[in-house]
Amino acid sequence: MKKIILLAVMAITTGCSIINPPQKTKYICGENMVEVTYIAQDELLIKTGNTEHELYSAISASGSRYINDEATITFWNKGNENALEIRGSSFAQCQPVA
């Protein structure tokens, strides 16, 4: 019984990839300043102005793609390329702020 509980705990904790401390990066997307905080491997927060949006990992043909629950906000990155879409408005050239 102890082995089963130990295996269950290992399976649960292995799937939770928390980034400690969370990694924050600021981007300029068009005329918008966007702060992205990577909370976990499959979750991030995007702050635009005074609004924060929680996004989750989504299927992507290439790179990493994150969307919110309503699928109205998408953040995509691959290597040095980053893109943001908010309610149908695309910002394809998000550049990190030094």
Image (cartoon, helix red, strand yellow):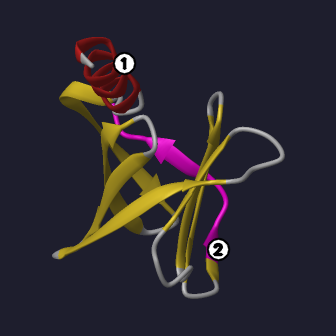
- Position of residue 22 in the picture relative to residue 3 (left or right): left
- Position of residue 52 in the picture relative to residue 88 (left or right): left
Comparing 34 with 22, the one in front is 22
Query: Which is in the foreground here, disc 1 or disc 2?
Result: 1
Amino acid beneath label 2: Ser
Q: Which residue is mark 1?
A: 7
Is residue 91 highlighted in magenta? yes
Q: On residue 90, which mark appears? A: 2
Dot 2 falls on a residue whose secondary structure is: strand
Q: Is residue 76 above or below residue 8?
A: below
Quadrant for the C terminus in the image: top left
Residue at image coords 36%, 39%: 97
Residue at image coords 49%, 60%: 29
Range covered by the magenta-colored residues: 90-98
Is residue 72 highlighted in magenta? no
Residue at image coords 64%, 86%: 88
Amino acid beneath label 1: Leu
Horizontal and vertical percent position of residue 73? 51, 74
Mark 1: give few (<14), some (14-19) or many (20+) Cα within 10 Å: few
Q: Is residue 26 above or below residue 59?
A: above
Comparing 13 with 52, the one in front is 13
Quadrant for the N terminus in the image: top left
